[in-house]
Amino acid sequence: MIVSMETSLCQCFIEKPGASSEPPKQFTFDGTYFIGQTTEQMYNEIAYPLVEGVTEGYNGTIFAYGQTGSGKSYTMQGVVDPPSQRGVIPRAFEHIFETIQCAENTKFLVRASYLEIYNEEIRDLLGKDTKQKKELKEHPEHGVYVRDLSMHTVHSVAECERIMAQGWSNRSVGYTLMNKDSSRSHSIFTIHLEICNIDTAGKDHLRAGKLNLVDLAGSERQTKTGATGERLREATKINLSLSALGNVISALVDGRSKHVPYRDSKLTRLLQDSLGGNTRTLMVACLSPAADNYEESLSTLRYANRAKSIQNRPRINEDPKDALLREYQEEIKQLRLLLSGQLGTTNLTSLLACQASETEVTSRSRPQSSSVESEADKERIKQSHPKDASVRALRIILKMPLAPRIILKMPLAPRIILKIPLAPRIILKMPLTLRIILKMPLALRVILKMPLYGPLESS
């Protein structure tokens, strides 16, 4: 074993095989963890503050680097048993949702995406066609992004793990002499977090955080992996992108360099903000203690030693212009005014016309309901509702894609709905309603909570 560590001093030593007279090379980092230590300990000491910062509105990136077979995927993914060896990614999921559950006067929106870079081609691991090549674009305000990358809203740790497993099964892996399940691509799992705090004055304050969880493919030597054909071509692309990453790190550390070659690789382009930008970044360097991997382990240590000298400039992302929570809040505000009768006849008419135009195409393509209201039912409805704005409002709400989720988040909406007599009966008699309800996962739950009684307060 050529690698040894002094964990209390965060130092790592590596000895050259067959050169006992030479002193071991020494490297100092923010933390060192040897064979007898667990992923849980590493996460709590090093990764926890970074993930906690993401829940406060910072950007964060954690990536594992090292030669093939050194334990990068094991560090990021881990194993279920024993629990102390669960990886960084599942622990980050738990950390984020525990923070959400404990937060007061705060709303969260959590979305996830998962991509891989295979042979310098970007693929969406959660898309319909995982082999389709995606384009890399740059926005003057939002920075570098992947065009048409699927984003999935998640509400729990279980949903995150399900999406993670789905994407992992679509990753490109292959057999080599050093690893039977060698990653043949770089993968990036990103959690997008939007936070809305309500202060004592009742005003909303929006922030946005992003956590990139990166599992890099390992650097390879053809003489050791025995790669040929397609595996050799994959290894060449992997080594080129890792070399480009090394060049970017060197350029950032060297203060005299006027140009940083981010564009030399898709990997460095996507990680541009994580290297010298608005992100807190953690690099986990994985080493092999075997004597025949001395050159690769020494190269990894030098790589990490240069990377720790990069100066990032993280800041809280306050009041982002593209926050979806802002759009949801505006829609909720509009619906509250509608249900409370504060919009007025003119605004209500214009809103009805707008909704009718939006649903015209959909109504043409769907067969009409066979249920027909009798004249007696219509007369009873008119007598019960002198002003049918509330009934029409309910019809509009059911046709809105986000309506069930919005209704459940509106404190006054259930109270208003309960005061509308015969509301459920009216809803069920609306044309196309039954088909719409069946396609809305939360709508059924809303309807079941509406009783068939309750006085209607006069306005």
Image (cartoon, rainbow, N blue to C red):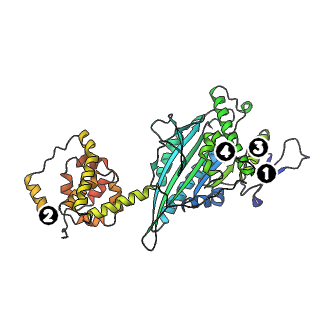
Residue farthest bottom in this picture: 200
Residue indicated by mark 3: 299
Query: Mark 3 or 4 closer to N-term?
Result: 4
- Looking at the picture, which amino acid does disc 1 mark? Ser
Residue indicated by mark 1: 4
Is label 1 in a helix, a strand or a loop?
Answer: strand
As measured in the structure, the alpha-carbon distance from the residue carrying label 2 to the one carrying label 3 is 80 Å
Residue indicated by mark 4: 71
Query: Mark 1 or 3 closer to N-term?
Result: 1
Question: Disc 1 vs disc 3: Cβ atoms closer than 8 Å?
Answer: no
Callout 2 crowding tier (Cα within 10 Å): few <14, some 14–19, many ≥20: few
Query: Mark 2 or 4 closer to N-term?
Result: 4
Q: Is residue 257 visible?
A: yes
As measured in the structure, the alpha-carbon distance from the residue carrying label 1 to the one carrying label 2 is 83 Å
| Rendered residue at 30%/54% (across/down) | 443
Mark 1 vs mark 2: give the one in front.
2
Query: Mark 1 or 2 closer to N-term?
Result: 1
In-image side of 92 versus 374 (left or right): right
Mark 1 vs mark 3: give the one in front.
3
Query: Mark 4 or 1 closer to N-term?
Result: 1
- Looking at the picture, which amino acid does disc 2 mark? Pro
Work out whether residue 386 or residue 436 is closer to the camera in this orientation and state it: 386
Location of residue 324 by image quarter: bottom left
Work out whether residue 403 or residue 342 is closer to the camera in this orientation and state it: 342
Give x and y (percent) for residue 25: 83, 49
Residue farthest left in this picture: 376
185 is higher (above) or lower (below) than 58: above
- Looking at the picture, which amino acid does disc 4 mark? Gly
Residue indicated by mark 2: 386
Question: Disc 2 vs disc 4: Cβ atoms closer than 8 Å?
Answer: no
Mark 2 vs mark 3: give the one in front.
2
